[in-house]
Image (cartoon, rainbow, N blue to C red):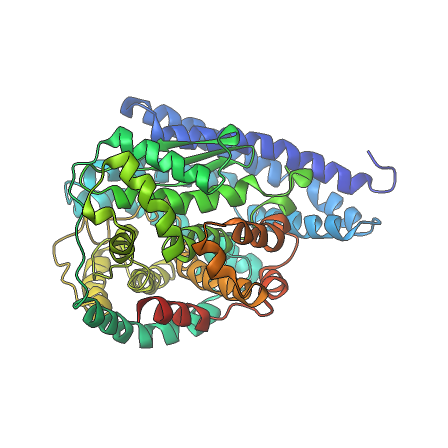
Amino acid sequence: MNASTPSYDQLTATWTRMHHLSHLQSIAGWDQAANMPPKGNEARANALAEMAALLHRMRTDPLLPDQLQRAEQEPLTAMQRANLREIRRQWQGANALPEALVQRQRLATSRCEHAWRQQRPANDWKGFVANFKPVLAGAREEAELLSQRMGVRKYDALMDRFEPGMTCDKVDRVFGPVRQWLPGLIQRVLDKQAHEPVMQPVGPFAVQAQRQLCEQVMRLLRFDFDAGRLDVSTHPFCGGVPEDVRMTTRFREDDFLGSLMGTVHETGHGRYEQNLPRQWLGQPVAEARSMALHESQSLSFEMQLGSHPGFVRQLAPMISAALGEQPAFEPDNLHRLMTRVQRGLIRVDADEVTYPAHIILRYEIERPLIEGDIEPEDIPGLWDTKMQELLGLDTRGNYKDGPMQDVHWPEALFGYFPCYSLGAMYAAQWFAAMRRAMPDLDQRIDAGDLAPVFDWLQAHIWSQASLWPTDELATRASGETLNPAHLKAHLESRYL
């Protein structure tokens, strides 16, 4: 222990211990989604609730306020000050919540999510609502306690868990214009694409061949298989820890592109985690800055790079080799397939043009739900109205492809959805900054050279972790804070 920073060193030792315990919690959560037999769920739910309570006790240790106060007075480096800022933020969030609530929430979400897996295919909205109500009650209680502690509105407090400093006012400022121009843009793209023929690939595509293709593409994107792996789950995700990244995808024999591009998406998350600064590992300053920044990495990989004509030309021969030659795998046709815009009910299958509509819809339901202005029974009616407004689709009576389609609500991840579209905006902003710094970027991607993209992300995003507040990180990387104009410019240039 450093004689001049004893309190800071005590704090970092505690946070390192929590990092090790969170590692086990994360792997147990991944296993629950990817491997666990159904009858293991109740025991796993109890074990995870116990771990959540243990970590909560560590974050609310009565010794911490004194250590935090003393550490503030110690001679710290800029990195240590940033770390102390993040430790204090985590400590404040945890101390707003009683342990009993944390444990109750963990049990409610484990039960709701487990039942949702059967209820969703059965279109059982009534059964879902019965399990969902305790989840919502816990989330509202958490929002109330956090908002009192932080002096912000309830939904702001829940968003802050995923996107520090983000508020409804900022989201409204960014989403407001998008809501205005998006329906018109979708229509213009659909009109243009109506005259562009596209050949559909002919399946079935063997799952084993798809899996090998996905792993090959992950290697092209420089995923480190000595520090991570790919598995299968109902809902694709990226979990684990930087030293052991667990990614999942899902396969369908009639659609290889869904799993392939889903894997490219998760690889963006995985590379961010694998490239966080190892020298600070175990400390909050070494963690990913926020979920919007995390999404900006997955969408940089999936949309900005993954749908780039130059990248598609690299994919085409790999797809033919894995799945057999066919005319649909010719690069231009593949690119048309991958940039095909279609109004659809399912968020995770949405193209990048219609995707923001799915997020705006969820944000506009989730916020009043948390703030107590609406109840679960109101969700289907609001969903139908907004789906009609934003995408012109009818979802009446279709709960499985409507409000039951995502895992976020059963898992109480309220405040997360906005991060997806904020992430798409950041990704467009990063690539605009790359093109300013490297005017030949597109020619280099065309030539098969992906290094400039990875090197830029490494220097400006991955290596910076949580050293800076989000606005400062964005300004250092791209010269400005979040600017949604870059997303509009990207969509118009790629699709129109």
Point out residue 490 in the picture as x, y percentages from the top left corner. Answer: 40, 68
Residue in the picture at 63% in, 44% down: 286
Residue sitting at the far left:
397
Q: Is residue 295 left or right of residue 94?
A: left
Q: Quadrant of residue 171?
A: bottom left
Q: Is residue 346 left or right of residue 142?
A: left
Examine the rendered structure and indicate whether residue 247 appears above or below residue 481: above
Point out residue 382 in the picture as x, y percentages from the top left corner. Answer: 22, 64
Residue 301 visible in the snapshot = yes
Examine the rendered structure and indicate whether residue 400 appears above or below residue 58: below
Point out residue 377 in the picture as x, y percentages from the top left corner. Answer: 22, 56
Residue 145 visible in the snapshot = no
- Could you say which is closer to the camera, residue 47 or residue 271? 271
The quadrant of the rendering that contains the N terminus is top right
Residue in the picture at 87% in, 42% down: 4
The quadrant of the rendering that contains the C terminus is bottom left
Residue in the picture at 41% in, 60% down: 418
Point out residue 31 in the picture as x, y percentages from the top left corner. Answer: 39, 28
Examine the rendered structure and indicate whether residue 470 appears above or below residue 218: below
Examine the rendered structure and indicate whether residue 140 appears above or below residue 250: below
- Could you say which is closer to the camera, residue 304 or residue 69? 304
Residue in the picture at 58% in, 42% down: 275
- Could you say which is closer to the camera, residue 169 or residue 95? 169
Q: Is residue 226 left or right of residue 410?
A: right
Residue sitting at the far right:
3
